[in-house]
Image (spheres, rainbow, N blue to C red):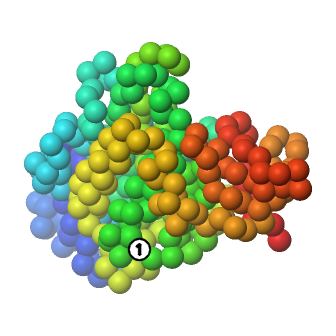
Amino acid sequence: MSDHWGRKRQILALLSSGQFVSGEWLASELGISRAAVNKHVDALESYGVAIYSVKGRGYKLASPISLIDASRLVKSIDDRCFYFDEITSTNGFMLGHTAELKNGDVCVAEYQSAGRGRRGRTWLSPYGHHLYFSLFWSFPQGMTQAMGLSLVVACTLVEVLKSFGVENIGVKWPNDIYLDHKKLAGILIEMSGQVDSECQLIIGVGINMAMSEEQGKGIDQPWSDLSALATMPNKTDLVIVLQKQLKRDIQLFEREGLGAFKMRWQAADLFYGREISLLIGENTVEGVCRGVDEQGAVLLETAEGTRAFIGGEISLRARE
């Protein structure tokens, strides 16, 4: 860890009590000048850490910060684990190193300067507030072997989050995770390689853990986070459990295909049995959601019969 981030993490640790602490006290504890404290606090705010600053009272975190214990993480994961305080994007890092990676290798960061979501959207990635995670996997039979994988990852996320006490959670096809009907987590799978020969996949996961009010203003859809839980999941534990469960589920998917997950998907599907609208480009198709097929397509019961839809610019919405 660079001294640049080592000092900032020390400041965050001293602010973790949730109480106001003075700049003078921080300077004394760290053995640095008051001006240096100001500089580090300003830098943290530029990385998206909301810090209250009140004259005569000092500094206080606006919302809790959960940082990875890098040493424990690396020791607890059998595969290689790359950990960064800041990075352009965890998916981007892994895509740049596919030739060196093996199945199960992961990259985790506290901050992404250019986090990516589906359809080219930006994934807001303030320092320390959320989980930014990518896992590498290679499929020897090509991209067709990986069809439906994003649904498997969504099932994994739901199972893992439930194991940490998260309730009222479900999935919106193809792979968005919702808590109390607001988006909690997203999945971005990026591929390199060939359609009919070996391909490499990077499975990116972003989970909102503690969104500040200011950060939330920059999101253009209803969102949720884990801050209302009685006990916030330890982020290090969450990464360890997620990595291990993903490996088990992807191996099951390789052996048995998406069929092994259809019941798990149906149990988590927020729209199963409901009337929905599919927005396909400028067209709208309406019907009753009947889950997914063996390729991961959403099934829609319409007046013309049950039809399958997959890929493209498809948006799924509940009918009013």
Q: Residue at x 78, y 66 (%)?
A: 275
Q: Residue at x 40, y 18 (%)?
A: 198
Total tally of numbered discs in the picture: 1
- From the viewer's perspective, is 283 left or right of 117? right
- From the viewer's perspective, is 267 left or right of 307? left
Q: Quadrant of the N terminus?
A: top left
The picture quadrant where one finds residue 9 is bottom left
Q: Position of residue 29 (x, y in %)?
A: 12, 67
Q: Position of residue 220 (x, y in %)?
A: 67, 58
Q: Position of residue 142 (x, y in %)?
A: 46, 22
Compared with 132, 11 (above or below) is below
Q: Residue at x 41, y 58 (%)?
A: 157
Q: Position of residue 281 (x, y in %)?
A: 82, 40
Compared with 102, 193 (above or below) is above
The picture quadrant where one finds residue 294 is top right
- From the viewer's perspective, is 57 left or right of 303? left
Tag 1, which secondary structure?
loop
Q: Quadrant of the C terminus?
A: bottom right
Which residue is denoted by mark 1 in the rendering? 166
Characterize the local packing of mark 1: few (<14), some (14-19) or many (20 or more) Cα atoms within 10 angstroms: some
- From the viewer's perspective, is 134 left or right of 67? right
Examine the rendering and report whether any part of residue 288 can be seen. Answer: yes
The picture quadrant where one finds residue 94 is top left
Examine the rendering and report whether any part of residue 126 can be seen. Answer: no
Q: Residue at x 55, y 62 (%)?
A: 266
Which kind of residue does numbered mark 1 sit on? Val
